[in-house]
Image (cartoon, rainbow, N blue to C red):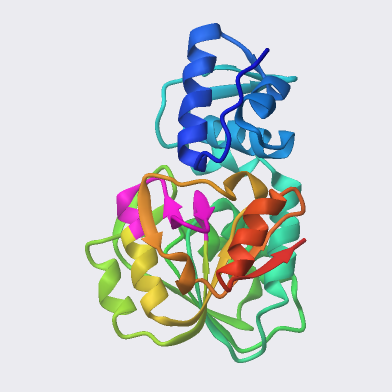
């Protein structure tokens, strides 16, 4: 008989799951679902979050201890995960952009997919895009001269091909764009938006301050997750675009807080 522990915050539930995995060497999804009183979808999202942090390895039916060191993963390593969902999120988000808009495009694999989706919209013209992502700038280059692309200066972070403070804040202080499209590692109704590293979280906060509308792009594995570095409280988010695998209870909690959650 498995003892049930109900109503735990996502970060506590994930920590307990991590301990069980380390202790036993393998834990099944069904057992974690029964133990924590949550759906198997929520458990799988928890395990994906642990895997993203280098704390576990997903295998058929459950998870085992990670076979690699914990820490931030490279852009290329993450890009292939949930790729179909990221592409659909990107296409949906691209529909939120209109001719003549000015936008900020944050670094990330889903926002890079958005860059491709925007460039593919041949009907879209006179768009100005500011970004701190070198990969994203290259994706957008295909749309020249329909788009004007401005790369925000700063210090290079090689793993993510991103530019961060110092220097990145100088341009952002003088901007007033229509929308910012943010990537992240966690979105939670109570904890807000969060990221795995502090330098990028700082740039994200400056981007939010420069935008009239905040749109967060996050696949289902990031919903209900709290990562290391806080970015903003949930009441600063106008729109969240995620995929249909997102935990329904987490989605309902976000909508109760006033977030327009768009499911792809």
From the top left corner, tell me how far across and down residue 242 is, in percent: 68, 58
- The quarter of the picture where the N terminus appears is top right
- The residue lying furthest to the top in this view is 24
Point 66% across, 58% down: residue: 251
When the figure is inspected, residue 144 is found, relative to residue 41, above or below; the finding is: below
Whether residue 263 is visible, yes or no, is yes
Whether residue 67 is visible, yes or no, is no
Q: Is residue 112 magenta?
A: no
From the top left corner, tell me how far across and down residue 42 is, in percent: 66, 39
Q: Is residue 186 magenta?
A: yes
From the top left corner, tell me how far across and down residue 222 is, in percent: 57, 47
- The residue lying furthest to the bottom in this view is 100
Q: What is the tally of numbered marks visible in this picture?
A: 0
When the figure is inspected, residue 186 is found, relative to residue 215, above or below; the finding is: above
Say which of 34 and 73 sits in front: 34
When the figure is inspected, residue 166 is found, relative to residue 225, above or below; the finding is: below
Point 53% across, 24% down: residue: 17
Say which of 222 and 254 sits in front: 254
Q: Quadrant of residue 95?
A: bottom right
- On screen, residue 75 versus residue 117, left or right, reads left
Magenta extent = 183-201
Point 51% across, 32% down: residue: 14
- The quarter of the picture where the C terminus appears is bottom right
From the top left corner, tell me how far across and down residue 149 is, in percent: 50, 76
- On screen, residue 219 versus residue 18, left or right, reads right
């Amino acid at each position: 008989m498995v003892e049930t522990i109900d109503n735990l915050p996502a970060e506590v539930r994930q920590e307990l799951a991590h301990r069980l995995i380390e202790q036993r060497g393998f834990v099944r999804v069904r057992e974690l679902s029964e133990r924590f009183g949550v759906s198997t979808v929520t458990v799988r999202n928890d395990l994906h979050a642990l895997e993203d942090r280098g704390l576990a390895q997903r295998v058929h039916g459950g998870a085992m201890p990670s076979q690699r060191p914990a820490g931030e993963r490279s852009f290329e390593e993450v890009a292939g995960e949930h790729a179909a969902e990221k592409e659909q999120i990107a296409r949906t988000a691209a529909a939120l952009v209109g001719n003549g808009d000015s936008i900020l495009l944050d670094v990330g694999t889903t926002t890079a997919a958005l860059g491709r989706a925007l460039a593919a919209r041949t009907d879209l013209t006179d768009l100005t895009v500011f970004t701190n992502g070198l990969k994203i700038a290259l994706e957008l280059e295909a749309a020249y001269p329909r788009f004007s692309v401005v790369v925000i200066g700063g210090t290079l972070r090689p793993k993510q091909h991103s530019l961060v403070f110092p220097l990145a804040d100088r341009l952002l202080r003088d901007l007033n764009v229509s929308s910012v499209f943010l990537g992240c590692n966690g979105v939670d109704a109570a904890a807000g938006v969060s990221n795995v590293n502090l330098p990028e979280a700082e740039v994200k906060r400056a981007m939010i301050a420069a935008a009239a509308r905040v749109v967060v792009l996050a696949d289902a594995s990031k919903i209900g997750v709290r990562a290391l570095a806080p970015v903003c409280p949930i009441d600063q988010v106008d729109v969240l675009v995620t995929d249909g695998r997102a935990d329904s209870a987490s989605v309902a909690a976000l909508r109760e807080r006033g977030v327009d959650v768009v499911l792809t």
